[in-house]
Image (tube, coloured by chain):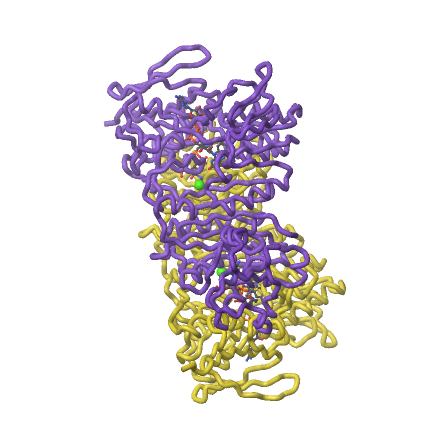
Chain colours: A purple, B yellow
């Protein structure tokens, strides 16, 4: 008895949708599979838009073609994937009782009703817009669709715009900032909260700010957009919450996205507390015949167990693939959850993160944590190593690594991938402290940044290193606190660059011979640092060995100091 | 009651020894710590020698200085570390009853006896030499000590040598090969066994061979050195096992190392079956007051539980650090074991590995394994992605990942670090299949190589993909086996490059319309491939969906084909 071919309908034709469809096809050559896609294009590599806009590459087709150069249009989907793709077609409603989807071909206005056995909702998200006046002026953009990318690319090519404002200091905001910078446009990023890149702890965020400023782009924090200002329907500037007006001919709004749940909601599917479609580990919605994936769903944090929204391209593909399997073999695959891992290029820096920042952890009531901030090179100096500044977060009691942030010109991506995998494996600081990584001089230090981070964290957990963050030291200095600060670098280093916070220069190698220069009061707070605070830490051990009881290392050293310096 | 300062003596002053000493000092400012070091230098970054020899950098001090530029000589050890370092001093014997070490200052011949409470043996290893005639000729080198590096660097700078032979096709052999190539020396690597880089499976090893040959360096496998040939005490050539004679003025022997265990053995410490000093997880030898670390010990494989030798610089440092802790707080730290992770730059390729290769697994009786070979880009084509060819090995029953090898011009190091961490966390293929990695176009594909490797492995484990290795296909072709081979690429790709093994060109997108060109016999073996065998795999799914029962994908596709091609 040969059964009827399974009828699969997929709403949404970019990442999660086509992935689910393609995977289902590989498991069932007979199924009827239809993708309904509102836009004209399919399978767009949205994450590549900033690089296309910035002119890193010029061939738009690269955003929608296979590695072999074949454009993923309806013809490709038909021929290569055996999938019918209806483009410029919007799904209008789902009838769960009749198991149908009604959709409209946008150019012609014709509507059609498709029967399904299994339905996939992969409708993605829509960029948020701040609720301020002037939003309809010409010159205000988002970067979300390929159409948006086309518009911004045109602006780049025309070379008329001189000043732009980016509203929102998140990943996409800074990718766009760099793209516009490449296009010769002077750009200011406006961030409403106190610090950019909310997944970073503030002191690292501040270092990225400094870096952006060295590239002739500006950042304004603690200040939202109050209004867009225009003339003759054309954007001429933005007004900030504090009244400042910034002239600009272009504004790109990048303040986050909200899941496209209207269809699902109207069909009576459960929506989660975070505003995304609720799904179980099989990516099944509250209707077992309807799956959902990508930017429109909520998923589970493997760290906190909470439901979270995680609008990332890799996850959309992974979730789509899980659905593809479950469409054909119900319950055969699960998506376990996420570890909050992401990355972004910002000029010569890479900014990466996985798991929780210290601020995240605190905000979630996880307060029994320890952190270590480690600055250092990615590979040896003789191989032209570049700086990495990382911060690892661990649970004090279990020692489990909960998070890692890393920034800098060095190879951040490798370290973040490593720690993301460690978090997935529930590894502890102790496990990471003896990790067997691939070491050779072109690729890492003998003890890689990840391992050293675990060592420093271990030292702190065992009470072998007491420390202060750069922020805490700055507060002490600003408040005139009574502490004795020692820079443990060499005189040459001190000559070249110095903080100027009342520090005494005592090079680490000279310390044992100069103990008499230290405060007699063995309980007085002594703060030590060097370039990265390795020598600061060694010096602290010496002082503790000689009876000083209140000795602290400033984590990350001069390299991690985000505040103005004397020199 | 203040007790006597602890007396610590460390034998060996390069990686493990100084690390143990330095860590102990940080935990005990009062202990007396002495390093006995045979050579004139201390704390040498041996792993950097090939890059110094090749002229990647010119300042020899970089091999022995801190990141702040301070040379780690006895003065530095005294001042910065509070450690006495006796250089050009050889430890001659250990008296475990008297707890003394007798040593000799080599320039003066004076001997001295040092008392210890705790002793560390970190004597490293000695390069092996093949037992053949002519070994004493001038022009035969190893690259192990800084003195060796000096000699080879001198040869580079003098630019007289034109032809060199490297004996041994392992990591160091190829690093030296590249260094000599940079020095303008025509180099041939001689490997006794059938394939270079023994930690790679043969088909990957062959791809590296091909790559080396494109750089005008030669490789001879399956052929050992039978004799070094000379005139007037000067090397003039080598004679191989098969009688061939190769003229050369320089030979570098790199056939592995043997642990320096003489002192330990003479002192009655237990030596393991692999020829290294036996230690427990605290890195304690059979005498609880004596620790040992680095190239002279055996450690435990976290994958097989076996004792193994793992002469790597990262491990020497990690083990030294564990000892440093145990010297001061006995039993406070353990070194859990290794995952066999290493890496090496070979011209424009990186070659990395972690865990077991398929050959390793088989040699250890682990035969119930599955593997997946995946070729693909590291980052998107539009970001100028580079090729990676990886092979992942997993245990069939548990799904646990056992190993990963990766080669190519792409960013191998990140993928190997990721899988090494996964192996450490005992992750399964299923876990890796949904890993949340840091994705953005400058850093990876939406689904990274590591994830795709897990997907392909999963497909094989679930019986959704049947496949052959390139070697198996080659054997079938050579033996004239009756199979139907399909190249599923585009005509343009086929025009540019093709295997010429009797294949039929049926582009993947055309396959559904050309099923009539396929063998009528649905049991006939059909072999499919494309550039990387993604389209080969999709095509296989189509054929299986249409009733063909014996359909196989050639893993890795054209990119992984190491044999001669028609085009
Ligand atoms: C500029 C930019 C840069 C990014 N960079 C990264 C990055 O570096 N790393 C990363 O991990 N992620 C990145 N992302 C996020 C990533 O692109 C998304 O997470 C991913 O595209 C989500 O896939 P999706 O399939 O869920 O939704 P989408 O890709 O948004 O696709 C949903 C599709 O559904 C269609 N649709 C919606 N409603 C309907 C309807 N009713 N009927 C028919 N069709 C409908 C939409 O037109 C859309 O094409 C970036 C996103 C942008 C915009
Ligand atoms: C060219 C080269 C490249 C390498 N590349 C890499 C790489 O890329 N990645 C990697 O992980 N590893 C690499 N290694 C291996 C790494 O250098 C070693 O694993 C590491 O140095 C071992 O450290 P150790 O302290 O155990 O021994 P060693 O570094 O060998 O130090 C032992 C020291 O002990 C001294 N000694 C021995 N006997 C006595 C005695 N009786 N009295 C006093 N002193 C004594 C020796 O003179 C020596 O200096 C490389 C090695 C070489 C030679
Ligand atoms: C391309 C797209 C349609 C998915 O199609 P797909 O056919 O599932 O995806 P791929 O072509 O990557 O992979 C096809 C199959 O080949 C397998 N494969 C990949 N490389 C392989 C190799 N070298 N050898 C064998 N199999 C391989 C994959 O595992 C996959 O099979 P599986 O899922 O059954 O395990 C969908 O991902 C998409 O639209 N992407 C573009 C948009 C996007 O991702 N945007 C967000 C990020 S910018
Ligand atoms: C350098 C050497 C003497 C070790 O000395 P060391 O003082 O233990 O090593 P380092 O200078 O790297 O680190 C010192 C301490 O600073 C810590 N540290 C490193 N970076 C830090 C930072 N940014 N902030 C705070 N602490 C830091 C380390 O964790 C270590 O402390 P711990 O072991 O107590 O946790 C030894 O490794 C050596 O001789 N190396 C050269 C030879 C070699 O390794 N060869 C083989 C490979 S080529
Ligand atoms: Ca991710
Ligand atoms: Ca290693």
Residue ID at (59%, 40%):
A212
B104 lies left or right of A89: right
Q: Quadrant of residue A427 in the image?
A: bottom left
Looking at the image, residue B26 sits to the left or right of residue B367; the answer is right
In this view, B208 is above or below B324 = above
- The image shows residue A292, relative to residue A408, as above or below, that is above
Q: Position of residue B156 (x, y in %)?
A: 72, 63
Q: Residue at x 42, y 72 (%)?
A: B326
Q: Is residue A2 above or below residue A545?
A: above
All told, the count of numbered labels is 0
Q: In this rendering, would A120 be left or right of B350?
A: left
Residues A409 and A487: in front is A487
**Residue B558 visible from this viewpoint:** no
Quadrant containing the N terminus of chain B is: bottom left
Q: Position of residue B256 (x, y in %)?
A: 54, 68
The quarter of the picture where the C terminus of chain B appears is top right
Where residue A30 sits in the image (x, y, percent)? 34, 27
Residue B174 in picture, x, y percent from top left: 60, 59
**Residue B533 visible:** yes
Above or below, A470 against B3 in this view is above
């Amino acid at each position: 008895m040969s059964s009827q071919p399974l009828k699969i309908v997929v709403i949404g034709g970019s990442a999660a949708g086509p992935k689910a469809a393609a995977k289902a096809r590989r498991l069932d050559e007979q199924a009827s599979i239809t993708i309904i896609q509102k836009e004209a294009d399919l399978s767009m590599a949205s994450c590549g838009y900033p690089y296309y806009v910035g002119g890193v590459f010029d061939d738009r087709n690269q955003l929608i073609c296979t590695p072999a150069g074949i454009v993923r249009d309806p013809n490709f989907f038909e021929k290569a994937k055996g999938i019918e793709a209806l483009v410029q077609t919007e799904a209008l409603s789902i009838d769960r009782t009749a198991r149908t989807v009604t959709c409209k071909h946008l150019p012609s206005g014709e509507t059609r009703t498709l029967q399904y056995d299994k339905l996939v909702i992969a409708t993605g998200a829509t960029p948020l817009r701040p609720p301020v006046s002037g939003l309809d002026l010409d010159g205000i953009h988002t970067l979300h669709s390929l159409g948006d990318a086309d518009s911004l690319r045109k602006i780049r090519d025309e070379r008329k715009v001189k000043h732009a404002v980016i509203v929102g200091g998140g990943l996409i905001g800074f990718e766009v900032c760099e793209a516009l910078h490449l296009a010769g446009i002077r750009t200011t990023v406006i961030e409403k909260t106190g610090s950019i890149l909310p997944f970073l702890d503030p002191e690292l965020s501040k270092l990225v700010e400094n870096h952006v400023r060295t590239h002739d782009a500006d950042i304004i924090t603690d200040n939202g957009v109050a209004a867009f200002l225009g003339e003759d329907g054309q954007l001429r500037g933005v007004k900030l919450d504090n009244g400042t007006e910034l002239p600009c001919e272009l504004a790109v709004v990048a303040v986050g996205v909200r899941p496209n749940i209207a269809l699902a909601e109207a069909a009576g599917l459960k929506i989660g507390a975070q505003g995304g479609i609720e799904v179980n580990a099989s990516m099944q919605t509250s209707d077992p015949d309807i799956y959902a994936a990508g930017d429109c769903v909520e998923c589970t944090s493997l760290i906190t167990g909470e439901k979270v929204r995680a609008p990332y391209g890799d996850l959309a593909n992974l979730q789509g693939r899980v659905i593809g399997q479950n469409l054909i073999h119900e319950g055969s695959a699960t998506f376990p959850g996420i570890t909050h891992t992401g990355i972004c290029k910002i000029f010569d820096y890479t900014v990466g993160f996985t798991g929780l920042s210290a601020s995240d952890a605190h905000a979630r009531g996880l307060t029994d944590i320890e952190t270590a901030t480690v600055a250092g090179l990615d590979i040896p100096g003789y191989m032209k190593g570049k700086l990495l500044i990382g911060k690892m977060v661990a649970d004090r009691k279990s020692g489990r690594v909960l998070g890692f942030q890393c920034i800098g010109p060095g190879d951040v991506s490798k370290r973040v991938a490593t720690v993301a995998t460690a978090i997935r494996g529930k590894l502890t600081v102790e496990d990471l402290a003896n990790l067997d990584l691939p070491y050779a001089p072109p690729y890492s230090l003998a003890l890689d940044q990840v391992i050293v981070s675990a060592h420093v964290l271990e030292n702190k957990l065992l009470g072998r290193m007491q420390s202060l963050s750069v922020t805490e030291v700055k507060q002490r200095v600003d408040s005139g606190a009574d502490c004795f600060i020692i820079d443990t670098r060499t005189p040459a280093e001190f000559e070249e660059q110095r903080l100027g916070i009342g520090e005494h220069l005592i090079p680490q190698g000279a310390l044992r011979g100069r103990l008499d220069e230290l405060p007699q009061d063995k309980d007085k707070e002594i703060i030590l640092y060097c370039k990265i605070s390795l020598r600061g830490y060694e010096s602290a051990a010496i002082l503790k060995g000689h009876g000083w009881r209140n000795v602290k290392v400033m984590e990350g050293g001069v390299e991690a100091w985000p505040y103005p310096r004397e020199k």
